[in-house]
Image (cartoon, coloured by chain):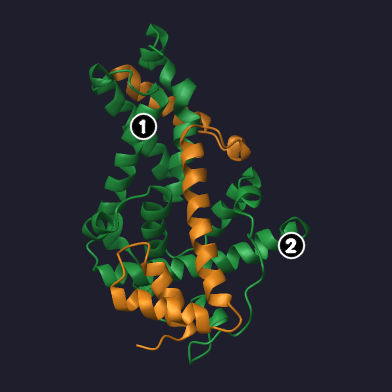
Amino acid sequence: MKPTPEDLDPENWLDAHGDILYRYALSRVRNHATAEDLVQDTLLAGVKSVDRFTGASTLRTWLVSILKHKIIDYMRKSKREFSTDDETMGDWAGEEYFDRKGRWKKRPPEWISNPGKAYEREEFWGVLQGCLGKLKEKQHTAFVLRELEGMDSTAICDQLEISPSNLYILMFRARLALRKCLESNWLDKNETDLSF
Amino acid sequence: MLLNCQGAAELASEADHRTLSRSERFWLTLHFRLCRCAICKKFAEQMKELRRAYRSLSIRQARGEVALDSNVRLSDEARERIRTMLDRK
């Protein structure tokens, strides 16, 4: 579909796409002010390069792709501010699951055995957002880049200047922590739906 | 390289980032078969399913299809500020 002149008029972008861009940014950077700045930078960059918008995608998709770059840029710049707590061994979800010998302490609940149903629901996104909010900064960044943005692992290591093995550990911990959080916040509310 | 359950879960997670070596795949498969309660295999499958869910939700969010967080909006102040910046251009 060819974009209309109204679509291309930046005057309309803020009203038409501002909130979507803001939600997208906020779910990835977890900070209102930063998310607002990212939306502003995205729209400004869009205005500057509107000539390059070919209409091959929708205008929104095009703006989101600019925003993605801005988010990745922001994450690369803020990596030095990662707390050193992220590196410590204690307080990770693994202790809930595994004993010292690496054996399961308890059986993980039988959940999500039907992927089509359970988390195609929008409520799941809300619970996931809440759980993502609890991850440590570095785990959160790695997780967002890999699982939400689908970024290549090598590129993530380059961006964050971490070694591959460091990334694997971060991701494993992030996955376990999220799982644990989802188990208590999603499973409890939806147990009847999930026990098939 | 006999794997314990934690090691197997770690390796299953790593498989998302790199191609496992032939021997790693062998030990992982063996572990899945031996782990009597089959928790490990299930755990690895669930990890994959969650990964798919995260991606699909993320894509739908980019399209503006996930309506749950529709109450999250730019504040009036932020909107005004951005509008002023855009007008300057």
Count of numbered circles in the view: 2
Identify the residue at image location x=37%, y=62%: B16
Helix, strand or loop at disc 1?
helix
Helix, strand or loop at disc 2?
loop
Identify the residue at image location x=59%, y=85%: A105
The quarter of the displayed image where residue A96 is located: bottom right
Quarter that holds the C terminus of chain A:
bottom right
Chain shown in green: A
Identify the residue at image location x=40%, y=62%: A137
Dot 1 alpha-carbon crowd within 10 angstroms: few under 14, some 14 to 19, many 20 or more: many
Residue A179 place in picture, x, y as percent = 56, 66
In-image side of B52 versus A74 (left or right): right
Chain shown in orange: B
Residue marked by disc 1: A40
Camera-nearest residue between A37 and A105: A105
The quarter of the displayed image where residue B86 is located: top left
Residue A1 place in picture, x, y as percent = 41, 14
Task: Identify residue type, mark 2.
Answer: Ser
Which disc number belongs to residue A195?
2
In the picture shown, does residue A3 fall above or below A63?
above
Task: Identify residue type, mark 1.
Answer: Gln
In-image side of B32 versus A78 (left or right): right
Dot 2 alpha-carbon crowd within 10 angstroms: few under 14, some 14 to 19, many 20 or more: few
